[in-house]
Image (cartoon, rainbow, N blue to C red):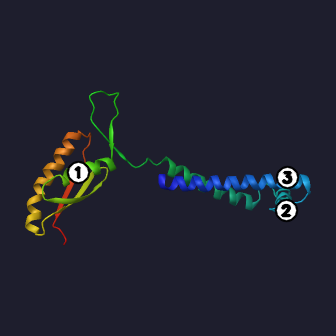
Amino acid sequence: MRLVNRPLAFILAAALIAGCVIVIAEVIGFAVHKSPLLVHWTSWYHWAHRTHWDAEVVQVWSAVLIVVGALLLILELKPPRTTRLPLRSGDDATDAAVTRRGLAGMLRGAATGVDGISSAKVKVRRRRARVTAASAARGRAAADTLTEPVIQALHGRLDNLDLRHPPRLKVRVVPRSR
């Protein structure tokens, strides 16, 4: 939701600033010239005097705004994505966690620390970590022999972290492409 909140907040702030500038200009223009400068607000003013609260246009726009507001409220009340994985602690007052990006970096380091692995791609989710390690050798047989050492290195790193709910590992070792 953070990816949506920030642009929406920027758009709302820019609209409010623009609206404030227009209102200030109209107030100054009305005080000096007695006429609208940027927005012909006098027609809106006269329409508002003629229209009653129970008019159909007012009811429709009220319903639209209520629906949009309820949708925004529901979206904001949705719990955020888990970006931190909690660690076990001996004390209840201690709150320690590792971010998914940090855990991905640690697992990448553990995988590339195995002899024969040249690079690794790691994707960490809330309950699963997917590791694709590239072996330095070209053959499939050489890559298959490296699978078990990579799995052991990754499990060792996860055990040292002592995560409260460690993610399930899905490990794939692929041979060098060229």
The total of numbered circles placed on residues is 3
- For marks 1 and 2, the one nearer the N-term is 2
Q: Residues within 10 Å of mark 3 (few under 14, many from 20)?
A: some
**Front position among marks 2 and 3:** 3
Residue 125 as seen in the image, left or right of residue 155? right
In the rendered image, the residue lying farthest to the bottom is 178
x and y, in percent, of residue 61 in the image? 69, 59
Residue drawn at point x = 16 percent, y = 45 percent: 156
Q: Quadrant of the C terminus?
A: bottom left
Q: Determine the secondary structure under disc 2.
A: helix
Circle 2: residue type: Ser
Determine the CA span between mark 1 and mark 3: 64 Å
Circle 3: residue type: Ile
Determine the CA span between mark 1 and mark 2: 67 Å
**Front position among marks 1 and 3:** 1
x and y, in percent, of residue 19 in the image? 72, 55
Residue 34 as seen in the image, left or right of residue 158? right
Circle 1: residue type: Gly
Q: Residues within 10 Å of mark 1 (few under 14, many from 20)?
A: some
Residue matched to label 1: 109
Residue drawn at point x = 69 percent, y = 53 percent: 17
- Mark 1–mark 3 CB contact (< 8 Å): no
Residue matched to label 3: 28
- For marks 2 and 3, the one nearer the N-term is 3
**Front position among marks 1 and 2:** 1
Residue matched to label 2: 43
Residue 116 as seen in the image, left or right of residue 10? left
